[in-house]
Image (cartoon, rainbow, N blue to C red):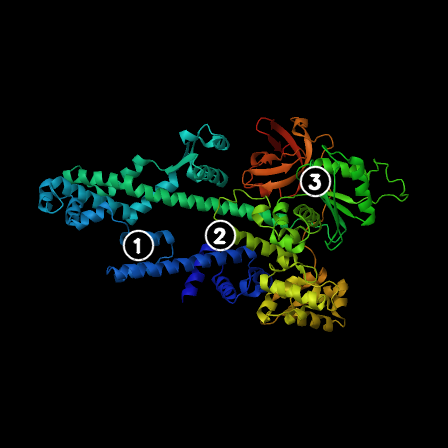
């Protein structure tokens, strides 16, 4: 019954068919992963995509949390002896966390308040008398309550007002009314803590020293910046509505006229608002606004991560990876087509050492010896200078290798992001992979492998260290990890994984696997040789039928005897394809290679109770291009030869650049001057756009116009307009 309620609530909230939601919840409960459900269970979900299925999963988790909270609330109120059938019915029907807490608030155990003290002194009847506002002489009425700790009528009235103030602050109508006021008109205000105003650490928050704006217009990045300043003790943040109007609205509910009792109730309402109600709702809205800002920042980070992981791969080529540097030299590694380390050494082509000729000879020797097909250069310190040096070597500007008569091979040269390479190089994964190599060699290997296959290499690094986030260290870390893990899993399964070359770390993100089964697969591969069929997976220790069902369709075996083993066609659908081939008098391989035979297939003939048109359509698309990589082709890029530092920039210049990071307010672009420039969202198009991703994507090659160079703050402003 509960699941039916959950399905109905989720379907209504997400505007989805209730049957599709119910089926999705059932699949999730069976242990199916989001990528598997999205790809291979379209008939049951009505074709829901990964985003919709993830939303269903997240909503379901929240509803389960509310259900647990309801059980606690019911038990507490029941134990107090205050549960009524009406109250229990109301709690049972409530599925809004805020509303539930409002219902619970009057019964919630709390520290000893002024109102509780007054109740213990027997002043609740007086508070009720005052709220009725019928007494002409409240002081005379109060005299009846003077006893024990209540010394006089004034003390009795003060205690009664404390009870009224708490009653007002805990009333559901009062709370909802003030919430509405916060939603409509609250302002967020930021002030600098005077003692910190002139400190060096405060300078980066100078924009928020005296800042105010409507809360509903405050963007995610501004709110997170202010909250970071607050957590560092530099800023003081407040959220407040129009106090006068808010109190006035409350008084209309509780004050019936300008009578002696009415004036006392009015004082209590003002006190309740200022001391209890407003701080409570402000705390609530501070948490709510932070949660929304977190969600937006996490969404931006996850989308950037998706684009980064799905970056264009070079493929299996022999690569030279270079981690550039000045004083410490450039760390160079040579990798084979599978990414295995063949050779490493350091060269010193730049000042202060400046052994340029020796470095050029070393590069030429390595290119020839290891038949290098591409060169991958990290984009950090000395990147631009190293790029120019390598291109000079390839262009033959160093006539030094006179013994070699054959022409030097001309590998392609690429610049790749080295964000997180140092994190990887010091990680356990890197130590296990290269136990006898130092961190500099491991970092250069990572730079080389990122060019070959960004996805396979970047999954080894904590996403927070990859450098494409927005305040990622300030957001809810549990939610961030959940979103990023989902993103990595989605990308890995969207691309598919070569079962015979994938690392343990890559395999663990495949649907249905995880760390233990990934290790077991690698161990099995090491002991028994390469997999020749997907069916062999069933021999891997602890990889049972359920795990096989979840993972098999996402694992590829190039050159397998059954060509479907190198496709996204799931083994459960092999009999369908085999029947298609049989019906057209050919093998499965011939069906894949023969377009005419495929076009002659009427997929409606193969519809069954379990397999419908969506699955059959996917099968036909996969037979057209089995195992196709959804990622784009890699393109070479070159910075402007005449611009290498900020001092070379002139307003109005049109320059090539690469998008390195996308935020809500714009995109950062590397134009080759050691400092990324910013294209503000207002400079992205001649029309209004909702988000920078409407115009640009990560690692996109652009031509940008320089519109301002602030050398004092080292800021570069760029534009896409008029380019």
Q: Are marks 3 and 1 in contact (CB under 8 Å)?
A: no
Q: CA distance from mark 2 to mark 3?
A: 35 Å
Nearest to N terminus: mark 2 or mark 3: 3
Which residue does the numbered mark 3 point to in the structure image? 324
Which residue does the numbered mark 2 point to in the structure image? 478
Give percent across and percent down for residue 699. Answer: 65, 43
621 is higher (above) or lower (below) than 355 = below
Q: Is residue 300 left or right of residue 212?
A: right
Which residue does the numbered mark 1 point to in the structure image? 104
Q: Is residue 148 left or right of residue 509?
A: left
The residue depicted at 49 percent of the width and 47 percent of the height is 295
Disc 2 versus disc 3: nearer the observer: 3
Answer whether residue 318 is visible to the viewer in this image: yes
Location of the C terminus by quadrant is top right
Give percent across and percent down for residue 450. Answer: 68, 49
Give percent across and percent down for residue 531. Answer: 70, 67
483 is higher (above) or lower (below) than 636 = below
Nearest to N terminus: mark 2 or mark 1: 1
Query: 10 Å neighbourhood of mark 1: few (<14), some, or many (≥20)?
Result: many
Give percent across and percent down for residue 275. Answer: 28, 40
Nearest to N terminus: mark 3 or mark 1: 1
Q: Is residue 210 left or right of residue 46?
A: left
Q: Are marks 2 and 1 in contact (CB under 8 Å)?
A: no
The residue depicted at 41 percent of the width and 46 percent of the height is 288
Q: Nearer the viewer, residue 468 or 272?
A: 468
Q: Nearer the viewer, residue 202 or 66?
A: 202
Report helix, strand or loop for mark 1. helix
Q: Is residue 255 left or right of residue 213?
A: left
Report helix, strand or loop for mark 2. helix
Report helix, strand or loop for mark 3. loop
Answer whether residue 89 is visible to the viewer in this image: no
């Amino acid at each position: 019954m509960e699941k039916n309620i959950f399905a109905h609530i989720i379907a209504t909230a997400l505007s989805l068919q209730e049957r599709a939601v119910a089926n999705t919840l059932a699949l999730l409960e069976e242990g199916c992963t989001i990528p598997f459900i999205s790809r291979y269970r379209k008939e049951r979900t009505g074709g829901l995509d990964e985003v919709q299925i993830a939303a269903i999963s997240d909503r379901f988790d929240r509803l389960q949390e509310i259900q647990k909270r309801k059980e606690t609330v019911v038990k507490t109120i029941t134990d107090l002896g205050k549960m009524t059938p009406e109250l229990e019915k109301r709690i049972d029907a409530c599925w809004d966390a805020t509303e539930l807490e409002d219902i619970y608030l009057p019964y919630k155990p709390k520290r000893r308040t002024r109102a509780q003290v007054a109740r213990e002194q027997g002043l609740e009847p007086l508070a009720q008398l005052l709220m009725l506002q019928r007494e002409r002489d409240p002081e005379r009425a109060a005299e009846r309550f003077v006893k024990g700790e209540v010394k006089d009528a004034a003390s009795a009235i003060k205690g009664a007002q404390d009870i009224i103030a708490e009653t007002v602050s805990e009333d559901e109508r009062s709370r909802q009314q003030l919430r509405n006021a916060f939603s409509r008109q609250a302002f967020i205000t930021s002030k600098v803590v005077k003692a910190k105003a002139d400190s060096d650490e405060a300078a980066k928050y100078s924009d928020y020293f005296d800042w105010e704006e409507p809360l509903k217009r405050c963007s995610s990045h501004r709110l997170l910046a202010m909250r970071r300043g607050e957590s560092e003790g530099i800023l003081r943040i407040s959220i407040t509505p129009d106090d006068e109007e808010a109190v006035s609205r409350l008084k209309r509910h509780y004050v019936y006229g300008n009578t002696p009792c009415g004036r006392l109730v009015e004082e209590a309402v003002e006190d309740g608002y200022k001391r209890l109600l407003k701080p409570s709702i402000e705390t609530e809205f501070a948490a709510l606004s932070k949660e929304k800002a977190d969600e937006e920042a996490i969404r931006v980070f996850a989308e950037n991560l998706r684009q980064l992981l799905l970056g264009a791969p070079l493929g299996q080529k022999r690569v030279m990876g270079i981690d550039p540097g000045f004083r410490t030299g450039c760390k160079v590694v040579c990798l084979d087509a599978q990414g295995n380390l063949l050779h490493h050494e350091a060269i010193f082509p730049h000042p202060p050492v400046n052994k340029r000729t020796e470095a050029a000879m070393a590069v030429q020797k390595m290119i020839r010896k290891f038949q290098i097909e591409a060169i991958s250069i990290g984009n950090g310190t000395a990147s631009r200078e190293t790029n120019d040096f390598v291109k000079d070597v390839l262009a033959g500007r160093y006539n030094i290798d006179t013994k070699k008569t054959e022409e030097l091979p001309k590998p392609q040269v690429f610049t790749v992001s080295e964000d997180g390479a140092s994190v990887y190089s010091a990680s356990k994964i890197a130590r296990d992979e290269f136990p006898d190599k130092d961190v500099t060699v491991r970092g250069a290997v990572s730079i080389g492998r990122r060019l070959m296959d960004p996805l396979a290499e970047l999954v080894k690094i904590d996403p927070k260290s990859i450098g494409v986030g927005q305040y990622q260290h300030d957001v809810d870390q549990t939610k961030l990890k959940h979103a990023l893990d989902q993103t990595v899993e989605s990308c890995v399964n969207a691309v598919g994984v070569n079962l015979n070359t994938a690392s343990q770390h890559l395999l663990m993100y495949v649907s249905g696997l995880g760390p233990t089964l990934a290790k077991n697969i690698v161990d099995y591969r090491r002991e028994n040789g390469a997999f020749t069929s997907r069916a062999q997976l069933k021999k891997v220790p602890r990889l049972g039928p359920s795990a096989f069902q979840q993972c098999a369709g996402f694992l590829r075996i190039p050159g397998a005897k059954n060509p479907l083993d190198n496709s996204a066609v799931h083994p459960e659908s092999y009999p369908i394809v085999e029947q298609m081939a049989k019906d057209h008098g050919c093998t499965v391989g011939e069906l894949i290679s023969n377009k005419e035979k495929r076009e002659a297939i009427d997929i409606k003939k193969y519809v069954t109770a379990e397999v419908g048109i969506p699955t059959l359509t996917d099968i036909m698309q996969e037979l057209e291009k089995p195992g196709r990589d959804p990622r784009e082709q890699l393109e070479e890029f070159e910075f402007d030869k005449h611009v290498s530092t900020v001092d070379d920039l002139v307003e109005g210049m049109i320059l090539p650049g690469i998008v390195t990071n996308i935020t809500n307010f714009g995109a950062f672009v590397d134009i080759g001057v050691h400092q990324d420039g910013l294209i503000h969202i207002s400079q992205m198009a001649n029309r209004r756009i909702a988000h920078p991703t409407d115009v640009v994507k990560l690692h996109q090659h652009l031509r940008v116009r320089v519109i301002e160079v602030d050398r004092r703050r080292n800021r570069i402003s760029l534009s896409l307009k008029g380019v």
